């Protein structure tokens, strides 16, 4: 148990030292870090603009090239099924249910 706690302390200490060194490095070279971050931001913005601005205008979806066709046979089968259900429903409403308490 005690051995694991020491490893955690060593790990935390090493991360703290490494983080401190990284913070000092970024602080010493703040101007160059700012330039790099700005460049990364500009590149990301250009990528997003190209993807959603330029490519979206030139994109032709498949549905425009190959429009959906109305299938009369499928429509008739669905309509027939619906009518059969409606008839069953109406016929069940006309029948009088038996009283189970008699």
Image: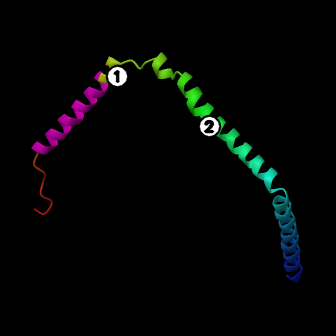
Q: Is residue 16 above or below residue 57?
A: below
- Quote the CA–CA distance across marks 1 and 2: 43 Å
In the rendered structure, are the residues bearing label 1 and label 2 in contact, judged by CB atoms less than 8 Å apart? no
Q: Quadrant of residue 1?
A: bottom right
Magenta span has 91? yes
Main SS of residues in magenta: helix
Find numbered disc 2 in the image and state the secondary structure of the residue it sits on.
helix
> Pointer 2: what residue?
48
Residue 18 placed where, x, y %?
Answer: 87, 65
**Res. 59 in view:** no
Find numbered disc 1 in the image and state the secondary structure of the residue it sits on.
helix
> Pointer 1: what residue?
74
Could you say which is closer to the camera, residue 89 or residue 7?
Answer: 7
Q: Is residue 21 left or right of residue 88?
A: right
Residue 90 placed where, x, y %?
Answer: 15, 39
Q: Is residue 44 left or right of residue 92?
A: right
Could you say which is closer to the camera, residue 45 or residue 2?
Answer: 45
Q: Is residue 23 above or below residue 69?
A: below
Q: Quadrant of residue 9?
A: bottom right
């Amino acid at each position: 148990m005690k051995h694991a706690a020491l490893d955690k302390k060593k790990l935390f200490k090493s991360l703290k030292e490494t983080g401190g060194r990284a913070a000092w490095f970024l602080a010493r070279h703040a101007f160059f870090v700012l330039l790099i971050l700005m460049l990364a931001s500009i590149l990301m913005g250009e990528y997003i603009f190209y993807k959603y601005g330029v490519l979206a205008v030139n994109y032709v979806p498949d549905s425009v090239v190959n429009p959906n066709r109305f299938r009369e046979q499928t429509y008739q089968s669905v309509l027939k099924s619906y009518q059969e259900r409606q008839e069953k429903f109406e016929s069940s409403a006309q029948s009088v249910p038996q009283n189970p308490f008699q």
